[in-house]
């Protein structure tokens, strides 16, 4: 009777010289880099979106758009609340569809679209945790005297420790030509 371990080349290699090393697959593609942009009503959104699109196009990546519907302050009547939520969702989907056309025009690909309800920063972190393909969060800084914006303030302070991906901040005062030149 033959010894199955002695005739198995992988078992023989691993017992004789240490663990067998698999040859890298030259046909395997590297993972696609996904650039996440948080959609809001700020004027800086266009800068973050353009930067993400140009970087995705140059790196063979894709863009993902997240729209977060934040809870209203008055939640007194359920019927009214449900109607308002439906209207907000319709507005979110309409805005995402418009931005998806812009992404397609700039990258040649369709973005992943996400609509979530809750606190914006919590939903950003939750989506990043749930979607391992998201690899970079792109935000643009506001130019207002109050500061760069609530998401940037959070993610450059306490929220940074909760991130598993890099954060790219596009300066809010950069012009389109300068942005195009650096991407």
Image (cartoon, rainbow, N blue to C red):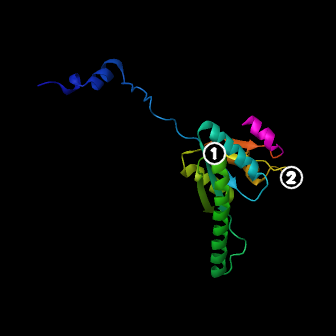
Secondary structure mostly seen in magenta is helix
Q: Residue at x 34, y 18 (%)?
A: 17
Of labels 2 and 1, earlier in sequence is 1
Which quadrant of the structure image shows residue 42? bottom right
Counting from the top left corner in percent of width and height, residue 43 is at 79, 54
User: Is residue 175 in the magenta section?
Assistant: yes
Magenta stretch: give its range. 173-183
Q: Residues within 10 Å of mark 2 (few under 14, many from 20)?
A: few
Residue 45 visible from this viewpoint: yes
| Image quarter hosting the C terminus | top right
Q: Spot the residue most to the left.
A: 1
User: With respect to residue 53, does 82 lie above or below?
Assistant: below
Q: Position of residue 160 (x, y in %)?
A: 68, 44
Check the image and name the residue furthest to the top: 17
Between residue 4 and residue 26, name the one nearer to us: 26
For the point 71% across and 46% down, the residue is: 50
Pointer 2: what residue?
A: 144
Q: Nearer the viewer, mark 2 or mark 1?
A: 1
Q: Secondary structure at mark 2?
A: loop
Estimate the spatial distance between the alpha carbons at disc 2 and disc 1, rounded to whole Å.
Answer: 30 Å
- Seen from the viewer's position, the closer of residues 94 and 15 is 94
Which of the 4 image quadrants contains residue 92?
Answer: bottom right
Q: Residue furthest right?
A: 145
Judge whether 6 appears above or below 183 on screen: above
Total numbered labels placed on residues in the image: 2
Secondary structure at numbered mark 1: helix
In the rendered view, does 59 fall on the left or right side of 24?
A: right
Does residue 155 appear in the picture of this structure?
no
Q: Which residue is mark 1?
A: 107
From the top left corner, tell me how far across and down residue 146 is, in percent. 86, 53
Circle 1 crowding by C-alpha within 10 Å: few under 14, some 14–19, many from 20: many
């Amino acid at each position: 009777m033959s010894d199955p371990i002695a005739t198995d080349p992988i078992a023989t290699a691993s017992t004789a010289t240490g663990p067998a090393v698999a040859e890298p697959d030259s046909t395997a593609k590297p993972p696609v880099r996904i650039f996440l942009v948080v959609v809001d009503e700020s004027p800086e959104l266009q800068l973050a979106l353009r930067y993400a699109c140009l970087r995705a196009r140059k790196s063979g990546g894709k863009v993902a758009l997240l729209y977060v519907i934040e809870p209203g302050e008055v939640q007194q009547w359920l019927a009214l609340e449900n109607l308002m939520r439906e209207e907000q969702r319709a507005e979110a989907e309409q805005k995402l569809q418009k931005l998806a056309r812009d992404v397609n025009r700039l990258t040649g690909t369709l973005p992943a679209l996400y609509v979530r309800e809750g606190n914006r920063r919590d939903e950003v972190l939750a989506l990043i945790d749930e979607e391992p393909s998201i690899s970079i969060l792109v935000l643009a800084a506001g130019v207002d005297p109050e500061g760069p914006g609530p998401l940037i303030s959070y993610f450059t302070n306490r929220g940074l420790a909760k991130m598993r991906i890099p954060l790219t901040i596009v300066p809010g005062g950069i012009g389109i030509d300068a942005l195009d030149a650096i991407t």
